[in-house]
Amino acid sequence: MGTAELAVIGGSGLYQIEGLNDIEQVRVDTPFGDPSDVITIGTLEGKRIAFLPRHGMGHRISPSDIPVRANIYALKSLGVERIIAVNSCGSFKEEVKPGHLLIPDQIIDRTKGRPGTFFEGGIVAHVPLAEPFCGDLSEILYKSARDLGATVHKGGTFIVMEGPQFSTKAESFLHKSWGASVIGMTVSPEARLAREAEMCYGSIACVTDYDCWHDTHEAVTIEMVLATMAKNIDHAKQIIKLAAGRLTAGRACECASALKHSIVTRPDSIPPQKKKDLDILIGKYIK
């Protein structure tokens, strides 16, 4: 089975990456079930990259049903250290317009009951998540977008809603009052699980609409989302290619050692099967 150092998780409208060479497709079995789809590995800008369509090819998996633990675990098992996520979203700020990009730095999680941790069933870990996106990776994504001439905003809070329905007006006005920048359905628990897996995670948030708070713009529809998303996808692909070439070996961020002091369960109290299942996450700390 092949390996990769960088992964791209594609959202609505992004189901493949042009320019990949030496392509292979791999199926990965995980203790958390099957990933969303077959993972494609190829070479881009001299780096081996794994691509995974979040919703599956053909967009058949609803946001609430995405097997996020299986996705992150599978990418970890392939050697991935960094994840670039592409996420469609609605904007709460007049200046963050449909067609713009935003590189978020914070999350407010409004999802309901999605499995959000690898650490359960006999093992407990509390990873720090004050900065849920990797600052180093996010900076590379921002500079790459800016250098390519995209209209991109640096930083902002990403509200993650359950979906699959869009917001009510009351919800939209509430979230806007919190000072959030954008809203979508898929950043969490991806970012949380990536941190538990000691992987860097950054998002290219592609703004498709103004949610439903804006009094001079029509309420969001799926046609609106897909039409604007199609325009954003070309930018996202270019950013990914440029960012991949700028990533250097080794990581100085805290993501790489997030579990070092986070596992609180005594090693002799962890069930043997759980140790085996989570070995790719905890093996360097617990034998």
Image (cartoon, rainbow, N blue to C red):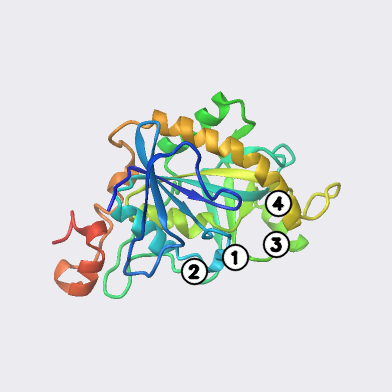
The numbered disc on residue 228 is: none
Report whether 199 appears left or right of 284.
Answer: right
Return the disc, 1 or 2, that comes first in the chain's sequence: 2
Name the mark nearer the viewer: 4 or 2.
4
Point out the frontmost of discs 4 and 3.
4
- Nearest to N terminus: mark 1 or mark 4: 1
Which residue bears the numbered disc 3?
A: 166
Residue 140 appears in which quarter of the rendering? top left
Q: Position of residue 261 (x, y in %)?
A: 25, 54
Percent x, y of residue 166 = 70, 62
Q: Which percent across, then down, holds residue 135?
A: 43, 38
Q: Nearer the viewer, mark 1 or mark 4?
A: 4
Residue that mark 2 sits on: 114
Residues under labels 1 and 2: Cα distance? Answer: 9 Å
Q: Mark 4 sits on what residue?
A: 225
Q: Residue at x 42, y 42 (%)?
A: 134
Give the structural element (helix, strand or loop) at label 2: loop
**Residue contact between numbered discs 3 and 1, judged by CB atoms under 8 Å:** no
Q: Which residue is mark 1?
A: 162
Q: Secondary structure at mark 3?
A: loop
